[in-house]
Amino acid sequence: MIKVKFWLLSILSGIILSLAWPAIGDQTILIFIALIPLLFIEKQLAKHTSRWKSLWVFSYAYLSFFIFNLLTTWWIYYASDWGMAMAVICNSFFMAVVFWLFHLTKRWVGQKQGYWGLIILWIAFEYLHLNWELSWPWLTLGNVFANDPEFVQWYEYTGALGGTFLILSINLLLFQFVDRYLSDGERKWQPLIYALVILLAVGISSYTTYTSYEEKGESFHVVVVQPNIDPYYEKFHGMAESEQIDRMIEQSLENIDEETDLVLWPETAFPTPCWEHEFEYLYGTEEIRKVISHYPRVRLVTGLLSTRLYLDSTQLSPTSKKFRHGMGWFDNYNSAIEIDKSDSIELHHKSKLVLGGEKVPFLKYFPFMKRLSITLGGSTGGYGEDGSPTVFFNEDGKAGVAPIICYESVYGEYVTEYVRKGAEILAIITNDGWWEDTPGYKQHLAYARLRAIETRRGLGRSANTGISGFINQKGDLFNTTEWWVQDSIKGELHLNDELTFYSRYGDYIGRTMGFLAPLLLLWAFVKSRNKTEQRLSI
């Protein structure tokens, strides 16, 4: 009977987590109670003398996080059923391991220190998940507030990991209240009062900032194009590249005028892979230059698939491939370029790649895995990456634009690198049509609002299919397109050159917890060994 109750509580935690998530349930407030059923299970099992109790804690946690991952990211199936299965299974496992480690830590170092350990271990995990080869930070807990900009204006100081800290803290306080209330313990109302005071203080402070904030910087006029070319049946086969380019040129001219500073085309707007030393001779480049000749103020940022040629073996990247016949090597990139009235073409390579589809993990250490990329759906050997972003400037070296390609927009600290390099606005180019009309593209759009708040940068977003539009420095969406509609829109953003605290210091919360987590686990291990030796001596 007890096990049935625990299984039901485990399921409840997973469902509540999912209902809180953007584009799933959108009941954000539920995130503050989502872990309480799971914490209740852990505390009850911690009292048992069974040698298998730790395994049961892991099992219940895995079920909760499996439900959470499945209900929030099932839409990956439309791009890859295998990829969806691996993302859900593996990410659920990682989350369950963190909760299991919290259980063991609490067991050996004490209850009070153990609950603090949950915060330390979980944020350390999320920070690791932002930076290692198996990175999948889509479900970072702090992302849950993506559609609530009024509540998270303080992300300009903490980033999304600050949101995770708040969520875990409130869950622990409310769990303490429920636990004391059920056991009729002393000072049972104290944790509830603390939780309410914290939430009210954070909410009022953030809302005050939101209502009083004024856009900073000079006006910058942007035209965004959403060509709505089906990625499965038209973009890479079925519609000629010249036809696609002509469509986007026509759409751009609908809104370009003498005030236009920037035009955004989506990811892989040039669908045919091209050599990087031949950009100037592409049909798209020639047509764009014709437009710029009439509107010399315009800069156009677009996505394309590029290929770099290597003749020197000492310059090879881990993902480079040798020609089957002839001399030399090459590497494929998911790229962005900027074309303006100057003779040069600026280039940025996507550096946060989608695991499986664009990247084979640990390729630097295990080169033989290069062969697996065909099975995983990427280019042969995976796409190359530069590791750091490139900012596009105008001829005067001003008005820096951050060319953020698709998945890169999920990484808060990575986006701050653009800002520290001089980006005054953010430009996201993406292709969200792989996931059909599901929560995927809505979540992707919502996360961009957090990047605007963290950096206080206006943001333009061009999606091949999905939702295109604009986000101001407060995180407000405006002038957006509809799903699966060919459209061209224009908006006014502001060039801001001030650095927020988060832009300067990035995920300092994650680095701090990443430092403390191994120390905490080492402390727990030492105490467990001491207690074991004491029992043996008796």
Image (cartoon, rainbow, N blue to C red):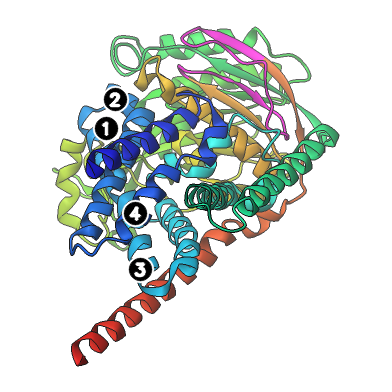
Please state if 465 lies on the left or on the right of 9 as rendered: right
Q: Above or below — where is 376 with respect to 512?
A: above
Question: Quick check: is 471 in the magenta stretch?
Answer: yes
Question: Quick check: is 449 in the magenta stretch?
Answer: no
Which kind of residue does numbered mark 4 sit on? Gln
Q: Nearer the viewer, mark 2 or mark 1?
A: 1
Please state if 267 lies on the left or on the right of 189 as rendered: left
Residue at 67% across, 15% down? 479
How far separated are the C-alphas under marks 2 and 3? 42 Å
How far separated are the C-alphas under marks 2 and 1? 8 Å
* Towards the viewer: 512 or 294: 512
The residue beneath circle 4 is 44
Q: Quadrant of residue 269?
A: top left
Q: Quadrant of residue 437?
A: top left
- Do labels 2 and 3 touch, CB within 8 Å? no
Residue 313 position, x and y percent, is: 27, 60
The residue beneath circle 2 is 79
* Towards the viewer: 362 or 148: 148
Disc number at residue 107?
A: 3
Q: Nearer the viewer, mark 2 or mark 4?
A: 4
Disc number at residue 412?
A: none
Magenta stretch? 464-489
How far separated are the C-alphas under marks 2 and 4? 41 Å
Please tell me how crowded label 4 is: few (under 14), some (14-19), or many (20+) other residues with Cα within 10 Å.
Answer: few
Residue at 33% across, 11% down? 234
- Do labels 2 and 1 touch, CB within 8 Å? yes
How far separated are the C-alphas under marks 4 and 1? 33 Å
* Towards the viewer: 284 or 280: 284
Q: Earlier in the sequence, mark 2 or mark 4?
A: 4
Q: Nearer the viewer, mark 4 or mark 1?
A: 4
- SS class, disc 4: helix
Disc number at residue 84?
A: 1
